Amino acid sequence: MTVLRESVTLPNGAVLPNRFMKSALSEGMGASDRGPSKRIERLYNRWSTGGYGLVVTGNVMVDGRHLGEPGNIVVEDDRHLDRLKSWAKGFQDHGSPIWMQINHPGRQANALGGKRQPVAPSAIAARVPGMMKPRALSRNEIRDVIERFATTAAIAEAAGFDGVQIHGAHGYLVTQFLSPLTNQRTDEWGGDPARRRRFVIEVLRAIRAQTNPSFAVGIKLNSADFQRGGFTEEESRDVVRALVDEGIDLLEISGGSYEAPAMMGQVAASTAAREAYFLDYARSVRAITGDVPIAVTGGFRTAAAMERAVSEGDCDIIGLGRPTALVPDAPKGILTGVVTELPSANVKIGARSILGRVTDLKAMDGALDLSWHADQLHRMGDGKEPDPNRSWVDALVMLGVRNGPAAFKPRTRSIR
Ligand SMILES: Cc1cc2nc3c(=O)[nH]c(=O)nc-3n(C[C@H](O)[C@H](O)[C@H](O)COP(=O)(O)O)c2cc1C
């Protein structure tokens, strides 16, 4: 286990002490005023001693009117600055850097969270249970959202976070601009690949304009959206090229959306069997990323596969999502040789023949997997240990409690 111990230097000069990154996991633990809670600090305490080279927070919203989930933290001005400082400082006291992932859900907004019509590049609904048809953003509103990303980043910097990660994956607003399936605009924000990627480039520029050069700015980007007629690997590589030219500090690769949850392992069996779902794509962008390190997230479970991916040069950093909800000190375990394989909870809905009649099982499996792992985060926030034996029924109940009955409705056809 030598290579995973090695540090990595980012273009902004920051040094990550090793090759493990805790990827963003939405905690849903914001306080009632949408600021960070004591529970979230308790949860991050667990990760702070886990031996990570970098920890990325769950997605923080840039606009309180549009939430991905009811419990999201929102940072749109400095009203929560003291508690944000306490969150960052409490974590950094133990060593590794912490970045805030910043996001706008666009059409994937949760109806219970924002209580208003979602916005998106075009008025095209996501075919996901419980999601409402969005309305198209005006050009002024697009400028406003871009500035919001920059404001949130500037506040994160003021609070002491070491960087931000733009959420450019999983079907949220940035990917909605990138994908031809969701962006059917004909103005300067859509119509061809260059105009579709303009939004993310402008977000990066706006953040750079409002933060210091030593502040890290990374992105989690989809390799593809895994849908026919959608955002392709070729287009994704062009986005990477543009982001590298604009001075991104770290590229994390993922894929899919709530309509096609590749990031949760709903990929071809042959891909899933190779453990890391997006490694082939990562290999294909190596030549264009120069000295910008690449992290890959999705599917890594064995120490041997992690070691191989880094030593063979397919990626520089190993992103871990779900395993960190069960084994919060996963890197420590692997680096000391105590752990050779992380647990992989295959959470699937039971009673399939009955429930399959009233809901979309594939979409429900993805939602249940998320909910089951979110429950583990909540346990740690309450000062308890994760529970690997938690039943899918309990996770299903919590899914309903957090997201309301709309979470179980079969998906409707998108309105084009
Ligand atoms: C409970 C839960 C919450 C998640 N929240 C986020 C999030 O806020 N932002 C994000 O980019 N990815 C999020 N993800 C996806 C993970 O970061 C990761 O991409 C995915 O779980 C695949 O990696 P893994 O196989 O290591 O779990 C979430 C996943 C889970 C299970």
Image: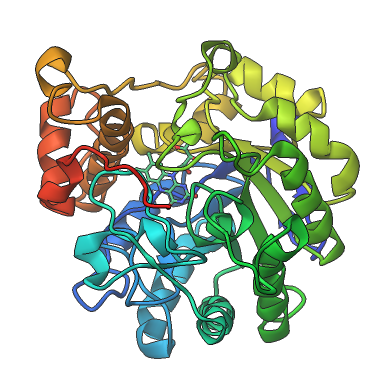
How far from the left and from the top, in percent, is residue 43?
Answer: 32, 53
Task: Count the labels in the image.
Answer: 0
Residue 265, given in percent of the width and then of the height, sits at 47, 26
Front-most of residues 341 and 278: 278
Snapshot quadrant of residue 107: bottom left
Residue at horizontal 14 percent and vertical 13 percent from the top = 353
Can residue 397 be seen at all in this image of the molecule?
yes
Residue 14 placement, left or right of 65 = right
Question: How far from the left and from the top, in percent, is residue 228?
Answer: 57, 33
Note whether 56 is above or below 1 in the view shown. below
Left or right of 383, for residue 76: right
Please tell me which residue is depicted at 80% across the width and 50% down the height of the picture.
238
Q: Nearer the viewer, residue 54 or 295?
A: 295
Q: Is residue 142 left or right of residue 387?
A: right
**Residue depicted at x 20% and y 23%:** 349
Name the residue rendered at 64%, 18% in the picture: 305
- Return the x and y of residue 394 as percentages of the image width and height: 11, 33
Coloring basis for residues? rainbow
Above or below 138: residue 18: above
Locate the N terminus by quadrant: top right
Locate residue 326 relative to residue 23 in the image: left or right: left
Q: Is residue 1 visible?
A: no
| Ligand 1 - quadrant of the structure image | top left
Determine the image quadrant of residue 281: top right
